[in-house]
Image: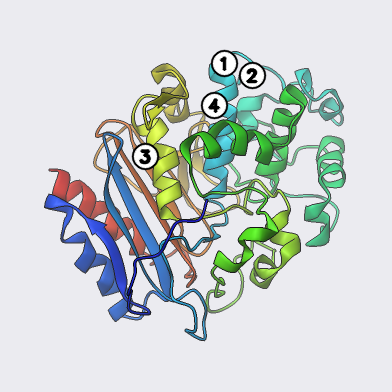
Amino acid sequence: MNTTGTAGQAAGSVTGIALGRFAHLREAFAANFTSGDELGASFCATVDGETVVDLWGGWADEARTRPWESDTIVNVYSTTKTMTALVALLLADRGELDFEAPVARYWPEFAANGKAEVKVSHLMSHSAGLPDWHEPITNSDLYDWEKVTRLLAEQAPDWVPGTEPGYHSVTFGYLVGEVVRRITGRSLGTVFRQEIAEPLGADFHIGLPASEDARVADLIPPPGPPVRHISVDVMATRTREWRGAEIPAIGGTGNARAIAGIHAILANGGVARGKRFLSEAGCRKASEVQVSGHDRILGFPVRNGLGFAVSGGRFAFPHPNTIYWGGYGGSLAIIDMDARISIGYAMNKMLHLRGDMRAVGLAMEIWKAQG
């Protein structure tokens, strides 16, 4: 899926398109580099399925030896969850998955330890009471699908499922992914690639082939101590083991163009690049609030739909039918179903969530320009 970088691009400069009334986004994006907030990044937006902004720039490594090119990709941590959720929405729209069914219908072993009534919707909305493993988990365990899913199936929930939100930062991908595997007989990453990424020509991977390693930017850990709900060492994202593994909550690799292009499906009633992936009703399922309140893990108010946060929790966006999710360090996906806008942002200089307005600030400029 390689694309050619702009010929003659000045190393570290901002390149790409910002069309018509969105032209000022180039300056807004560049300002983040001037201020020192960015090292390397990409930002993309679509309106009515058409790309109106597609910008990239800076450096792919801390030593500033590799420019961030058109086809540079990077680990986006929890923005990966949006791709996993989209796979589940796709299966549900086809009638293969019922969000109101107990997880055990598809994954019988999951019924153990008082989980017989836990619904798929509880997994999708971070309310299943399984935000982490009770046993210590290492980075290498994350590459062992059978082990981590077995442990989740065996353990008891930490609270009554469905009653309150608690961020399932890493477990989300294994829980939803195992349901997908039981239904389709294929891994989550395989279904995503075959049913979504390849038909769209989208450069996003849950399980990155080694052939693409040279295009991956190095994540720069945020300053200060790690966030308590993310125990994975950021430096692990630079390894072949991490990149090649399917870690469907936090292990995805892509760029803003891929994020915005894929989520144009949800922004445009199920259609992207002239191909229908879901029905409009199937898209709208994502914005149906399943649980709301103070998140037990994150420590702030949330409104969670099926795999996405819904406008009005921590962030209130201009239109009510806006769904979103972000990744540790700053990556972001936003889908405005009312204005038919999809937005993607991916970067390698990680900042902590509080006070990081790089992506949201750019997104607000898109809405202002749209009027």
Comes first in the chain, label 3 or label 2: 2
Vertical placement of residue 10 versus 272, above or below: below
Write the residue at 31% across / 45% down: 316
The residue at which mark 1 appears reads as 94
Query: Residue 175 location, x and y as percent?
Result: 71, 37
The residue at which mark 2 appears reads as 97
User: SS of the residue at dot 1?
Assistant: loop
The residue at which mark 4 appears reads as 89
Query: Residue 135 location, x and y as percent?
Result: 86, 53
Work out how far the residue at label 2 is from the one at label 4, CA to CA, in angstroms.
8 Å
Give the number of the disc on residue 335: 3
> Of the residues shown, which amino acid type is indicated by label 4?
Leu
Comes first in the chain, label 4 or label 3: 4
Residue 132 located left or right of residue 202: right
Disc 1 vs disc 2: which is toward the camera? Answer: 1
Q: Nearer the viewer, residue 169 or 176?
A: 176
Work out how far the residue at label 3 is from the one at label 2, CA to CA, in angstroms.
23 Å
User: SS of the residue at dot 2?
Assistant: loop
> Of the residues shown, which amino acid type is indicated by label 1?
Arg
Label 4 close to label 3 by CB (< 8 Å): no
Comes first in the chain, label 4 or label 1: 4
Residue 292 located left or right of residue 272: right
Q: Is residue 229 something one can see in this rendering?
A: no
Coloring applied to the structure: rainbow
Work out how far the residue at label 1 is from the one at label 2, CA to CA, in angstroms.
8 Å
Residue situated furthest bottom in the rendering? 63
